[in-house]
Amino acid sequence: MSNYRRLYVPAGTYFFTIVTYQRNPYFANSDNVNKLREAVATVKQEMPFNIIGAVILPDHLHFLWTLPPEDQNYSKRIGRIKTIFTKSFRGNNTLPDTVSISRQKHRESDVWQRRFWEHSLKDESELETYLNYIHYNPVKHGLVSCPHSWLYSSFHTWVQKDGYSSNWGCVCQGKFDKIYYFDKIKNYVGE
């Protein structure tokens, strides 16, 4: 049995990486992105939390969340998001016949990896680093050349709030901004 521990901090700010089972690109389909957004909205109503940043890539997602005071249960929220999305995605038959015996035993489908990565943020500097990581992630994975070109990201909201310039990390129009490296956080991101 693995010696796996999570850090739970009431009212904490956390970075998460949640990955699809066997890196299946379920979120390359915009209908599935909408189902995921609905699942997140449902869970936010049931158990409030604040989304600071997010990006949805074809086979994984990253979030930055802050939990309310006296609350530290991000695992329950993520589990609930996975369950709601899976039911919406698969219907009531959430355990296809092709699912391994181990996954059946744990009532897991073939939609999500069993675990997720989390990191509790310590300060504003870390928050900025992880927010940049989230917004640059579609470029890092070669999905787009500039952060503003990826639709499923909080980058656009941050530009509207003047948190980023619209050409942050951009190479459009012959203009080359900066390439971002995130080696310091590689142990926490799950790619």
Image (cartoon, grey):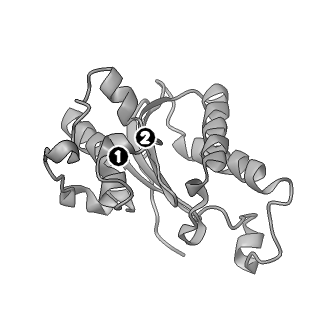
Q: Position of residue 17 (x, y in %)?
A: 44, 54
Pointer 2: residues within 10 angstroms few (<14), some, or many (20+)? many
Residue found at x 26% / y 43%: 132
Q: Position of residue 27 (x, y in %)?
A: 57, 54
Give the mark nearer the N terminus: 1 vs 2: 1
Q: How far apart are marks 1 and 2 (CA)?
A: 8 Å
- How many badges with numbers are in the image? 2
Quadrant placement of the N terminus:
bottom right
Q: Please tell me which residue lies in front, 184 or 31.
A: 31
Residue found at x 74% / y 53%: 89
Q: Please tell me which residue lies in front, 67 or 144.
A: 144
Furthest residue toward right? 92
Find out whether the residues at labels 1 and 2 contact each other: C-beta distance under 8 Å: yes
Q: Please tell me which residue lies in front, 24 or 184.
A: 24
SS state under label 2: loop
SS state under label 1: helix
